C-alpha cells in the first residue's frame, strides 16, 4: 500500500516548485486551461470560464484524495502550469500523472521538470508504477514522457473521447520503481 499524503506536498528541483494552488493563481490558470491545446488534450471544461478557474483553485488548494493538483511555480512564484498526481490503483501501488503548461512558458522543459518531481515523489510514497497517458497526436506530451525515462507500452485505439467530440488514440507510458534511472 502507498502512504498517500494528507496535505499537499511542496516539491522543488531548484528551478520550479510544485506548491498548493492559491487565489492569486486564478488568472494564470484561466489562460492556461482555456488555451486550444489544453482544451484539445485534457479534460478541462470547454468553453473554460473564469468561474471554472476559481472553482479549480478553490477545490484543489487542499484536496489530496484520490489525487492532488498543484501549481507549477517559477522562481518568482508565478504559476507557469499545473500538474497532478492521482491514484490509479491503490492496491497495486500505481499512480498517474497529468499536466498542462501556460502557453507562454512552453518549450523550456517545465513539464519535464514537473513530471520528474512527481515520479520521484511517487517512489517516496511507495508507488511501484507511474503511468501517463497521451494522445497519439500530442507530440509535446509524448516527448515529455520519454525524456522522463518512461517506456511507451502501447496504444489504446479511440480510448478517449476529448473535447469537441474528438476521439483520441491513447499512448500508454509507464515507469517502474525498478527501472534503471536516467
Ligand atoms: C504538453 C505540454 C504540457 C508540454 O509542456 P512544456 O513545458 O512545453 O514541455 P517541455 O518543454 O518539458 O518538453 C516539450 C518537448 O516536446 C517537444 N515538442 C514540442 N512541440 C512539439 C511538436 N509539435 N513536435 C515534436 N516535439 C515537440 C519540445 O521540443 C520538447 O522536447 P525537447 O526538450 O527534447 O526539445 C504543453 O505543451 C501543454 O500544456 N499542452 C497542452 C496540455 C497538454 O497537452 N497536456 C498533456 C496532456 S497528456
Image: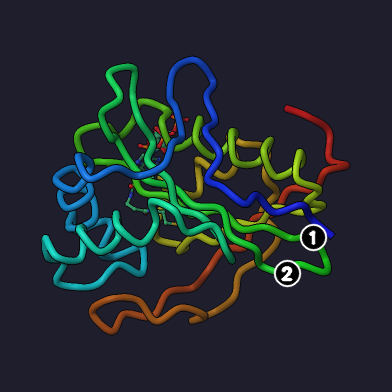
Q: Quadrant of residue 23?
A: top left
Image-based side of 14 in relation to 130, left or right: left
Q: Position of residue 112 (x, y in %)?
A: 50, 34
The disc at residue 89 is 2
Q: Quadrant of residue 57?
A: bottom left
| Quadrant of the drawing holding the N terminus | bottom right
Identify the element where label 2 is drawn. strand
Residue 123 lies, with reference to residue 49, above or below; the image says above
Residue 138 lies, with reference to residue 12, above or below; the image says below
In the rendered structure, are the residues bearing label 2 and label 1 in contact, judged by CB atoms less than 8 Å apart?
A: yes
| Quadrant of the drawing holding the C terminus | top right
Identify the element where label 1 is drawn. loop
Q: Position of residue 132 (x, y in %)?
A: 59, 56
Identify the residue at horizontal 37%, vertical 45% (top origin): 82
Q: Position of residue 70 (x, y in %)?
A: 43, 45
Identify the residue at horizontal 49%, vertical 52% (top origin): 84
User: Ligand 1 shows up in which quadrant of the image?
Assistant: top left
Does mark 2 have its CB less than 8 Å from ligand 1?
no
Residue at the disc numbered 1 = 93
Amino acid at each position: 500500500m502507498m502512504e498517500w499524503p494528507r496535505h499537499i506536498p511542496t516539491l522543488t528541483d531548484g528551478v520550479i516548485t510544485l506548491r498548493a494552488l492559491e487565489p492569486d493563481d486564478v488568472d494564470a490558470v484561466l489562460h492556461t486551461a482555456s488555451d486550444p491545446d489544453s482544451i484539445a488534450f485534457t479534460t478541462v471544461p470547454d468553453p473554460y470560464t473564469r468561474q471554472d478557474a476559481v472553482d479549480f483553485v478553490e477545490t484543489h488548494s487542499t484536496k489530496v484524495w484520490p489525487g492532488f493538483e498543484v501549481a507549477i511555480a517559477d522562481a518568482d512564484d508565478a504559476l507557469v502550469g499545473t500538474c497532478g498526481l492521482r491514484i490509479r490503483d491503490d492496491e497495486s501501488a500505481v499512480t498517474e500523472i497529468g499536466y498542462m503548461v501556460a502557453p507562454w512558458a512552453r518549450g523550456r522543459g517545465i513539464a519535464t521538470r514537473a513530471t520528474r518531481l512527481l515520479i520521484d515523489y511517487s517512489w517516496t510514497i511507495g508507488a511501484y508504477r507511474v503511468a501517463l497517458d497521451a494522445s497519439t497526436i500530442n507530440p509535446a506530451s509524448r516527448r515529455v514522457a520519454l525524456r522522463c525515462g518512461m517506456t511507451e507500452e502501447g496504444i489504446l485505439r479511440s480510448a478517449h473521447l476529448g473535447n469537441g467530440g474528438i476521439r483520441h488514440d491513447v499512448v500508454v507510458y509507464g515507469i517502474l520503481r525498478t527501472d534503471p534511472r536516467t
